[in-house]
């Protein structure tokens, strides 16, 4: 077996930059979730206020609305994409540092405003990093590039979501946030390290063109609506199966500490391994085979949760279930992100990737309510069996679209 294609991809600046940019993308999102809630709980902010802070994540859902603006306009410093990324990173660093100076119990309104501006800036950074990644990666590197980005993103989640909690007990929350602001600023190294996309890409010349043409470009594709359904349904089974995992583990008797250590940390490591394995394999498999093989693996890796529902509180089965499910999810996510990149027209990659991401989130949004109803009526064993079935429509659509997907070449053998 020739391993050269696997290692050739590591010999360029694109992959190294993606690791740092993935970290830069994951840090602010992670900070405004569990760490911000923990800080507010520590200073005895009431639960109603803490609950309202979940609304600050809205810009991540709506980012497709201003993505065309970032396709149309450029800051003439480091290039069209990198200038926006650097500006976002500087603003994010300032905002994280500013939030450290606000007492949540005295001025939660100001903290909420800063958090909302932070998530808007973070979502804007995501838009341009996604566009840069789509523009700069050649076909054979898309899978590995997606995996490297996810790896950096998950490391940031570990730093912001776990290490910050540990640090807060030692140095306090304000000092912890200031340290996170410094780390955020240091992540801009990846922006300077990253190469610019090709100069041959012709970007929209008017804002109207930047808004309308991405939609026209996609809709004019052959079988565009089926592609859209595939975007919505490919990760549906994974979203459905994982939506109640923590509730299920608590229900069968695992403690919060056990869930944190095994499900959160162990699962995160398994997901990173799965993502990176998927990226390496995509160099050889190509897009369609990776989507099909990884989609099947993603579906089958839910089966250990069926066994766990039968056995109840059993450590080895829980470890197997958590690690296999996250490994399969990592495989599927890598192929899916590469698929979204392959769909994008480079002239409008910011707008189109943001729009595709929004459609792919539909499954996650609606999975929770339906999953809760099913689990309460069917029980956990049947719930996870039904979860297996929710992956089938996406795989069936992928098979029907195999000829079209093969044309979106990602890898040597696509």
Image (tube, rainbow, N blue to C red):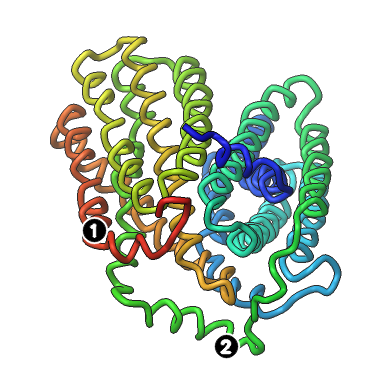
Residue at label 1? 397
- Residue 97 drawn above or below residue 302: below
- Determine crowd level at label 2: few under 14, some 14-19, many 20+ residues with C-alpha closer than 10 A: some
Q: Please tell me which residue is depicted at 33% across the width and 38% down the height of the picture.
A: 298
- The quarter of the picture where residue 346 lies is bottom right
Q: Secondary structure at mark 1?
A: helix
Task: Please state which of residues 219 and 257 is positioned toward the viewer in this rendering.
Answer: 219
- The quarter of the picture where residue 207 lies is bottom right
Q: Please tell me which residue is depicted at 23% across the width and 39% down the height of the picture.
A: 387
Q: Residue 144 in the image: state x and y as whole percent.
A: 55, 44
Q: Please tell me which residue is depicted at 46% across the width and 15% down the height of the picture.
A: 258
Q: Residue furthest front?
A: 1
> Along the horizontal axis of the image, is 187 left or right of 343?
right
Q: Residue 3 in the image: state x and y as whole percent.
A: 54, 34
Task: Please state which of residues 167 and 309 is positioned toward the viewer in this rendering.
Answer: 309
- Determine crowd level at label 1: few under 14, some 14-19, many 20+ residues with C-alpha closer than 10 A: some
Q: Residue 404 in the image: state x and y as whole percent.
A: 32, 66
- Residue 84 drawn above or below residue 137: below
Residue at label 2? 209
Q: Secondary structure at mark 2?
A: helix
Q: Residue 397 in the image: state x and y as whole percent.
A: 24, 58
Q: Please tell me which residue is depicted at 50% across the width and 79% down the height of the picture.
A: 214
Q: Is residue 32 visible?
A: no
Q: CA distance from mark 1 to mark 2?
A: 31 Å
- Residue 235 drawn above or below residue 35: below
Q: Is residue 362 visible?
A: yes
Task: Please state which of residues 23 and 180 is positioned toward the viewer in this rendering.
Answer: 23
> Which quarter shows the C terminus?
bottom left
> Along the horizontal axis of the image, is 199 left or right of 231?
right
- Residue 378 drawn above or below residue 83: above
């Amino acid at each position: 077996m020739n391993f050269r294609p696997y290692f050739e991809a590591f010999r360029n600046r694109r992959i190294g930059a993606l690791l740092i940019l993935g970290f830069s993308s994951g840090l602010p999102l992670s900070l405004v979730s569990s760490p911000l809630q923990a800080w507010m709980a520590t200073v005895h902010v009431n639960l109603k206020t803490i609950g309202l802070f979940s609304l600050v994540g809205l810009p991540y859902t709506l980012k497709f609305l201003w993505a065309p603006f970032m396709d149309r306009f450029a800051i003439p410093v480091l290039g069209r994409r990198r200038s926006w990324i650097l500006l976002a990173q500087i603003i994010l660093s300032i905002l994280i540092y500013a939030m450290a100076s606000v007492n949540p119990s005295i001025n939660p309104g100001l903290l909420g405003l800063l958090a909302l501006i932070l998530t808007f800036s973070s979502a804007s950074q995501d838009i341009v990093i996604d566009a840069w990644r789509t523009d700069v990666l050649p076909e054979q590197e898309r899978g590995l590039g997606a995996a490297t980005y996810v790896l950096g993103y998950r490391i940031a989640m570990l730093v912001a979501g776990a290490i910050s909690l540990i640090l807060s007990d030692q140095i306090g929350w304000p000092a912890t946030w200031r340290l996170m602001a410094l780390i955020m600023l240091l992540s801009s190294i990846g922006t300077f390290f990253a190469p610019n996309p090709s100069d041959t890409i012709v970007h929209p010349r008017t804002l109207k063109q930047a808004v309308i043409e991405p939609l026209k470009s996609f809709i004019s594709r052959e079988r565009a609506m089926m592609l859209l359904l595939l975007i919505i349904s490919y990760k549906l089974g994974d979203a459905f199966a994982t939506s109640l995992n923590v509730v299920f583990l608590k229900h069968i008797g695992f403690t919060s500490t056990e869930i944190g250590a095994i499900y959160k940390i162990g699962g995160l490591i398994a997901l990173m391994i799965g993502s990176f394995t998927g990226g390496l394999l995509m160099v050889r498999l190509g897009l369609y085979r990776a989507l099909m093989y990884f989609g099947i693996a993603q579906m089958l890796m839910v089966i250990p949760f069926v066994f766990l529902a039968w056995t109840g509180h059993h450590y080895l089965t829980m470890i197997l279930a958590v690690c296999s499910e996250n490994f399969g999810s990592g495989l599927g996510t890598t192929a899916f992100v590469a698929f979204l990149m392959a769909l994008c027209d480079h002239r409008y990659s910011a707008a189109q990737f943001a729009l595709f991401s929004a459609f792919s989130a539909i499954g996650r949004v609606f999975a929770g309510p339906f999953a809760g109803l099913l689990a309460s009526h069917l029980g956990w064993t049947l719930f996870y069996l039904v979860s297996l079935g929710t992956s089938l429509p996406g795989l069936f659509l992928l098979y029907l679209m195999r000829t079209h997907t093969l044309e979106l070449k990602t890898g040597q053998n696509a």
